[in-house]
Amino acid sequence: MRILVTNDDGVDAPGLLALKRALDAMGETLVVAPEHNWSASGHRKTMHKPLRLAQVRLDDGTPAYAASGSPSDCVALVMLGALSAVGPRPDLVVSGINPNPNLGQDMTYSGTVTAAMEGIISSVPSFAVSTDARAAARRGIADPFEVAAEFAVVVARKILAEGLPPDTLLNVNVPGLAKADIPGVQVTRLCRRIYRDELVERADPRGRPYYWIGGEEPTAEPGEGTDFWALANGFVSITPLHLDLTAYEQMKHLQDWVLQI
Ligand code: MN
């Protein structure tokens, strides 16, 4: 059993180390993560500049690789054989642990999730794990990644026993609660996020305008059964995601347009 562990927060992120240490119980882990934080970078493939892998050590001394590219580049590099000299192709990709939840349309921004998507594109079972580390810290929980790391092992074991259907990944969100306060696990659908982005315009020292996208934390439209709802009610959320983004129910409507070329 060989598990590729990656993230979008960078190779130094505490969530990556927590995830790696938990998954060590299952087999051989290989850590390949971006050399800096790529949060909210989306699904990105580096095509116009070289990619480099540097050998580094995590905080506990574990050898790891820092890649100059995006989270999905990390996965692609491994799946295409960049590290074939150090071992066989991984059997599982686990991405995280992101310190903030990834819900609803966050799927399109999240480097944590898109790294797992890249694993699926390479036909390797993959899942993403996120938690709410700030909420955990507010509640005085000493290790904000511990519960999510433990649950990642539960999911990994189940995937290895059951497999995943083709083109399907799992997006896992664990609330920032003590384990005893989590009532259970909900299988969910994606919420519809409400982003509260605000444009801040300022002037640089030369008087030219620049922009900063700020604003409050996103929320979501209410709806029982969504990933947002599960987290808001203290549950762990698992959402199956499919790479086929076709809006099937719109195909007939579009055919009725009778477009001609
Ligand atoms: Mn992140």
Image (spheres, rainbow, N blue to C red):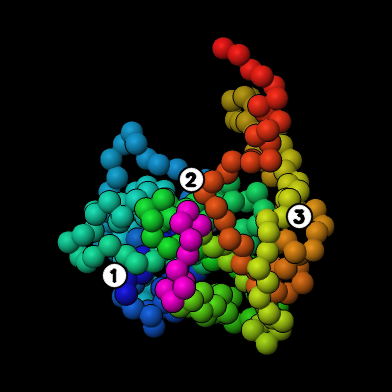
On screen, residue 168 above or below 215: below
Asked whether residue 161 is drawn in magenta, I would say yes
Magenta span: 159-168
Q: Residue at the location (62% across, 58% down)? A: 102
Q: Amino acid at mark 1?
A: Pro
Residue sticking out furthest to the bottom = 180
Q: Residue at the location (77% across, 72% down)? A: 233
User: Which element is circle 1 on?
Assistant: strand
Q: Earlier in the sequence, mark 2 or mark 1?
A: 2
Q: Nearer the viewer, residue 252 or 206?
A: 252
Q: Amino acid at mark 2?
A: His
The residue singled out by tag 3 in the image is 219
Q: Is mark 3 within 8 Å of ligand 1?
A: no
On screen, residue 131 above or below 211: below
The residue singled out by tag 2 in the image is 43
User: Which element is circle 3 on?
Assistant: strand
19 relative to 260 in the view: left or right = left
Q: Nearer the viewer, residue 242 or 255?
A: 255
Query: Total label count?
Result: 3
Q: Give the percent coordinates (x, y) of residue 59.
A: 38, 73
The residue singled out by tag 1 in the image is 63
Q: Give the percent coordinates (x, y) of residue 141.
A: 64, 81
Residue 36 appears in view: no
